[in-house]
Image (cartoon, rainbow, N blue to C red):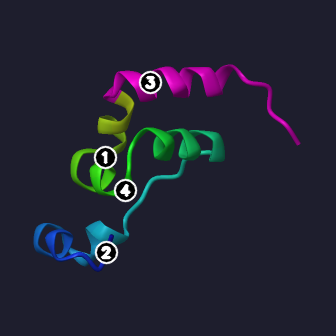
Amino acid sequence: MHRRAWFKRHYSREQLNAGIMVCQPCHKGIHKRYDEMTLGKQFTTLTSLLSDPGLKNHFAWVAKQRERG
């Protein structure tokens, strides 16, 4: 993503390298629902991820699962 011209024009290097910490099941659910281009253009903040109805349902499901370890 960071090498694509569109992102270089619209975001600073710091913005491109910033991220949020999510657990592995949430991360997998995010990528099952959306490709990286969509995530990079439409879901640039934690708030935008949490406001998506499908992801909100997935996050709620993950929260109910028993922790393994």
Whole-percent x, y for residue 47 in the image: 32, 36
Q: Amino acid at mark 3?
A: Lys
Query: Is residue 33 or residue 59 the one in the foreground?
Result: 33
Side (left or right) of 62 relative to 40? right
Other residues around mark 2 within 10 Å, as few (<14) / some (14–19) / many (≥20): few
In the rendering, at what x and y percent does residue 14 appear? Answer: 29, 73
Mark 1 or mark 2: name the one nearer the start of the chain.
2
Callout 1 secondary element: loop
Q: Quadrant of the N terminus?
A: bottom left
Q: Is residue 12 magenta-colored?
A: no
Residue at numbered disc 3: 56
Mark 1 neighbour density, 10 Å: few (under 14) some (14–19) many (20 or more)? few
| Residue 68 is one of the magenta-drawn residues | yes
Query: Mark 3–mark 4 contact, CB under 8 Å?
Result: no
Q: Nearer the viewer, residue 22 or 42?
A: 42
Question: In 3D space, how far apart are the residues under numbered discs 2 and 3 (Cα atoms)?
Answer: 27 Å
Q: Main SS of the magenta segment?
A: helix
Q: Say the numbered circle drawn on residue 16.
A: none
In this figure, which residue is indicated by the disc labeled 2? 2
Residue under pointer 4: 36
Q: Which residue is mark 1?
A: 45
Which segment is the magenta one?
A: 51-69
In the displayed structure, 42 sits above or below 50; it is: below
Counting from the top left corner in percent of width and height, residue 53 is at 36, 21
Q: Marks 3 and 4, Cα distance to the nearest angstrom?
A: 18 Å
Picture residue at 73% right of the left edge, 24% below the top: 65
Q: Nearer the viewer, mark 1 or mark 4?
A: 4
Q: Which badge, 3 or 4, is on the more N-terminal residue? A: 4
Amino acid type indicated by mark 2 = His
Instruction: Mark 3 vs mark 1: give the one in front.
Output: 3
